[in-house]
Amino acid sequence: MKKTLVVVLLAVFLVGTFAVADEAAIIDFTLLSADISVETTDRDGNAVNDQNRRTVMDYSRSAGSTYTEDQKSLMKTSLALANWEVQLNASARNVASLSNSQVIAAPVNTSKHTLDGEEIAVTVPFAGKEVMGVRIVFPTTAVNASAKIVPPYEIPAYEAMVDINDDGTYVVDEYGNYVNTSDVTTTRFEGGYGVVKNVGTIKSLSVTTLGMDYPHKLYVRLKDTDGVERRYLMGNLKFDGWKELKWNNPNYITDIRTREIRIYPIYPRGLPFVKFVGFEIARDAADVGGDFVGYFKDVKIIYDKAQLITERDIADEDLWHIVSDRESAKQTLEMTRFGNKQVDRYLERAKSAREADFTSSLVSDEQ
């Protein structure tokens, strides 16, 4: 027994001493282009892509039985870039800033025109892809102001992978179970869609952004398994062109021998995760106000693994279902919170005036 314990401790020591932290994209905005049409059409009635297939969430399941099937069919949203929101703090909030601050999908050019008018191909980062474009209208007065750029819903950590139809509905089998014919075995929002799992200590963060010489500060906001939200200062945006802003954990200890080692039970402890909550742009009172425009490509993380996943002699989860039951309960809670909020937004949008102008009383019926 003592010999076995010594071998295990030696293996842990060696792994920790020479381990290399993993790298993953928490969120990649080039994956969030609108690629299916749920409710948007052009003037001729042709479908216009307005949602992102991988991240579509159907909140009609939380709407109750008082809505028609046609109404429920419209109760869908996704992480498509046009659905993201700008939330201004009290100092920055006014009618003009609320109506003009927005997020859009910004296509990166693949060509440019010379002074002679000739169009030539260019080699630029992410050419031909869509990144997140943000406009924020800050006050011009000397006040501190900030704005959060947030997704249309809190990104779920436990949403199962499922096939999505072209109209945004989920594919289910005859028993009502999700159908997943893809090769994705993780949850839906892993792999660059907002969630990274099995995260221990965060070593560093990076943001790929296009600067335009604004002096404002950029923060990344993340939330962990315990629901604790943290804000990471990435630096200011006073530069021109694409750049990777980095945050390095000042408390990260590289040498495992100087760390405080804690041993946790292997089962049924679930995998800890971090999820992307949004960006925050802070404008100092001493800096110029007015319009801010920025572009973001991705957020990446370098981290220590929380657990070393290996094949075990007994399939614990197949026997006890402890982790799956817990994750199912968390998923149900997340969906309920998300659904209630989205249904309220749907009702408010349905009540909003859609007329752009009055019908003229000066025009006769014949004309």
Image: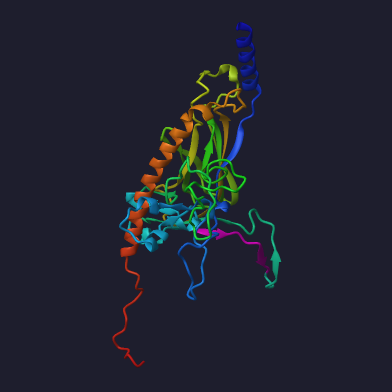
Residue 105 in the image: state x and y as whole percent: 52, 59
Residue 233 sits above or below residue 139 on the image: above
Q: Residue most toward the left?
A: 361
Q: Is residue 63 left or right of residue 282?
A: left
Q: Main secondary structure of the magenta part?
A: strand
Where residue 39 sits, quadrant-wise, is bottom left
Residue 209 in the image: state x and y as whole percent: 56, 49
Span shown in magenta: 104-114
Residue 254 in the image: state x and y as whole percent: 59, 24
The residue sitting at 49% across, 32% down in the picture is: 272
Q: Nearer the viewer, residue 331 or 303?
A: 331
Residue 295 sits above or below residue 267 on the image: below
Residue 148 sits above or below residue 165 on the image: above
Q: Nearer the viewer, residue 17 or 159?
A: 159
How many numbered marks have been drawn onto this rendered protein structure? 0
- Whether residue 48 is visible to the viewer of this picture, yes or no, is yes
Q: Residue most toward the bottom?
A: 366
Residue 19 in the image: state x and y as whole percent: 64, 25
Q: Is residue 23 left or right of residue 136?
A: right
Quadrant of the frame with the N terminus: top right
Is-magenta flag for residue 169? Answer: no
